[in-house]
Image (spheres, rainbow, N blue to C red):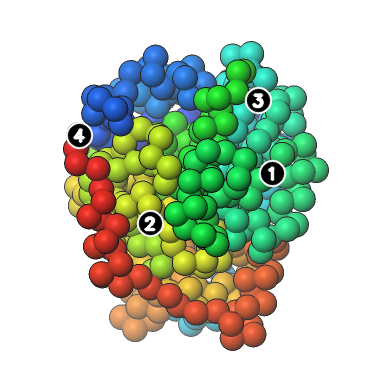
């Protein structure tokens, strides 16, 4: 197989689709630190978490030992509507860059939500329906997660309440309308509809919001409304479990043609895309079966990995969620209104944070205008308009390919193209009109937020 000509797009047969999710924690020597109760500072119990999350999702969240979770048949049936997704050889981009590198990307944007988020949304909606709930609440940044969850809830006939980061709500009205098409109730966050939203607005008048703010509001409504639970589109262990389908498919496709990536690149906001893409490859690395260079790419305006600290912090701005040990900028850090809405989170997945702290992966941050430079290069060569979030990975992949051109190395580069940017045209307009800046927080600003971290 290794000498077989590589097609432009590699599709798996339906029979080759993975039938289980891979739990990366089972192979981690150092497990991610447990979630802590903010009141007692003791590890959260299943009973405590069950008041916020669906029961079976709580079990997945706490399970550090089960390596493989069979995917329920109802979820597999839904996956078949848009999975398996293609693994694409970026021949045209390689030619444009004049690089000896071989570039592949896993494209997750071939569904109405336009992103990978549907992989976990349908799973979480399934478990909510199985539990007999009436509906769920959530937050969304750029809108991909909110769109995906509204689709999943419509499929299972569940109510869906979405708190959308205000800057994205205003910049991406069409994303908001897609959610409403699928029956979701969408509220800009922070809002006056919740106690926490009112508090944030009083302390930060005119704020454009953040994922941390929206999480707080969604949790408040879920906890205070009978028959509802809160679901999250990133960060949590359970989400990375569901998203492992991305990496599982990618590895099956690469193995089929004898391809081995040298470097694996993913954008990182909360961690769902990166964690899903790298899961089976990192598993091999942890078990000593293979080695890969793995790179997380984040915005310079919200640099959790590269300039954050590894500490226990609140997962939300309102400080009502459990404490998570992660790389964080501080739960009350509200990033500048850049356009990578899905990466506007102050923290990072506890799983990825542990792996990064253990030196098993790298991280880089890139300024916004360079991200859009890369996005435009990709669009003009590969024919897909990428989401700003995904374009962070594209930017780093291009950088790696250019290094190969300088050194003559024939590395194989794999990156995750998490979604499309057809609802992000306001961002592209500002880029073209020269109205986009590269705001980067100062050390003094970040120190101010770090000083307010909880003392655990």
**Image quarter in which the C terminus is found:** top left
Mark 1 residue element: strand
Mark 4 or mark 1: name the one nearer the start of the chain: 4
Cα separation, mark 4 vs mark 1, equals 41 Å
Residue that badge 2 annotates: 333
| Earlier residue among tags 4 and 2 | 4
Whether residue 261 is situated above or below residue 336 in the rendered picture? above
Determine crowd level at label 3: few under 14, some 14-19, many 20+ residues with C-alpha closer than 10 A. many
Real-space Cα separation, disc 1 to disc 2, in angstroms: 23 Å
Q: Residues within 10 Å of mark 2 (few under 14, many from 20)?
A: many
User: Dot 3 corresponds to which residue?
Assistant: 135
- Residue 331 is tagged as none
Q: Residues within 10 Å of mark 4 (few under 14, many from 20)?
A: few
Asked if residue 213 is positioned above or below residue 46 in the image, the reply reads below
Picture coordinates of residue 286, whole percent (x, y): 25, 40
User: In the image, is residue 71 above or below residue 100?
Assistant: above
The percent position of residue 52, horizontal first and vertical second, equals 48, 24
First reached walking from the N terminus: tag 1 or tag 2:
1
Q: Which residue is mark 4?
A: 29
User: In the image, what residue occupies the spot 25% across and 69% down?
Assistant: 444
Q: Nearer the viewer, residue 444 or 281?
A: 444
Q: Nearer the viewer, residue 233 or 96?
A: 233
Q: What is the quadrant of residue 420 in the picture? A: bottom right
Circle 1 Cα neighbour tier, 10 Å, few/some/many (<14 / 14–19 / ≥20) = many
The residue lying furthest to the right in this view is: 181
Q: Is residue 92 visible?
A: no
Frontmost of labels 4 and 2 is 2
- Per the image, label 2 sits on a secondary structure element best described as loop
Q: Residue at x 56, y 66 (%)?
A: 339
Question: Mark 1 = which residue?
Answer: 186
Q: Are marks 1 and 3 in contact (CB under 8 Å)?
A: no
Marks 1 and 3, the one that precedes in the sequence:
3
């Amino acid at each position: 197989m290794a000498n077989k000509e590589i097609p432009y797009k590699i599709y798996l047969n339906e029979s080759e689709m993975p039938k289980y999710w891979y739990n990366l924690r089972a192979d981690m020597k150092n497990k991610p630190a447990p979630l802590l109760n903010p009141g007692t500072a003791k590890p959260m119990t299943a009973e405590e978490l069950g008041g916020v999350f669906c029961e079976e999702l709580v079990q997945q969240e706490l399970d550090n030992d089960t390596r493989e979770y069979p995917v329920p048949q109802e979820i597999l049936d839904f996956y078949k509507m848009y999975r398996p997704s293609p693994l694409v050889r970026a021949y045209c981009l390689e030619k444009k860059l004049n690089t000896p590198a071989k570039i592949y990307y896993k494209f997750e944007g071939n569904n109405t939500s336009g992103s990978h988020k549907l992989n976990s949304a349908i799973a979480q909606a399934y478990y909510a329906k199985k539990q007999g709930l009436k509906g769920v609440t959530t937050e969304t940044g750029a809108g991909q997660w909110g769109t995906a969850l509204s689709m999943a809830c419509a499929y299972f006939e569940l109510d869906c309440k979405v708190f959308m980061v205000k800057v994205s709500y205003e910049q991406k009205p069409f994303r908001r309308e897609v959610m409403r098409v699928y029956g979701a109730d969408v509220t800009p966050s922070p809002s006056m509809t919740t106690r926490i939203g009112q508090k944030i607005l009083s302390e930060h008048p005119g704020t454009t919001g953040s994922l941390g703010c929206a999480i707080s509001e969604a949790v408040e409504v879920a906890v205070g409304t009978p028959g509802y639970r809160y679901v999250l589109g990133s960060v949590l262990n359970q989400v990375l479990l569901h998203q492992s389908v991305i990496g599982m498919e990618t590895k099956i496709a690469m193995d089929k043609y004898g391809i081995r990536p040298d470097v694996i690149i993913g954008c990182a906001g909360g961690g769902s895309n990166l964690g899903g893409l790298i899961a089976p490859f990192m598993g091999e690395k942890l078990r000593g079966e293979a080695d890969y260079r793995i790179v997380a790419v984040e915005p310079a305006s919200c640099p959790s990995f590269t300039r954050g600290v590894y500490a226990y912090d609140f997962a939300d701005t309102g400080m009502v969620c459990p404490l998570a040990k992660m790389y964080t900028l501080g739960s009350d850090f509200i990033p500048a209104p850049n356009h990578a809405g899905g990466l506007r989170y102050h923290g990072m997945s506890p799983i990825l944070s542990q792996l990064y702290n253990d030196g098993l992966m790298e991280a880089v941050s890139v300024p916004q205008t360079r991200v859009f430079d890369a996005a435009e290069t990709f669009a003009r060569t590969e024919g897909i308009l990428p989401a700003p979030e995904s374009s962070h990975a594209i930017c780093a992949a291009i950088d790696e390919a250019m290094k190969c051109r300088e050194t003559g190395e024939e590395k194989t580069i794999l990156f995750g193209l998490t979604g499309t940017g057809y609802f992000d045209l306001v961002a592209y307009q500002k880029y073209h009109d020269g109205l986009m800046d590269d705001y980067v927080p100062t050390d003094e600003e970040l120190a101010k937020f770090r000083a307010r971290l909880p003392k655990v």
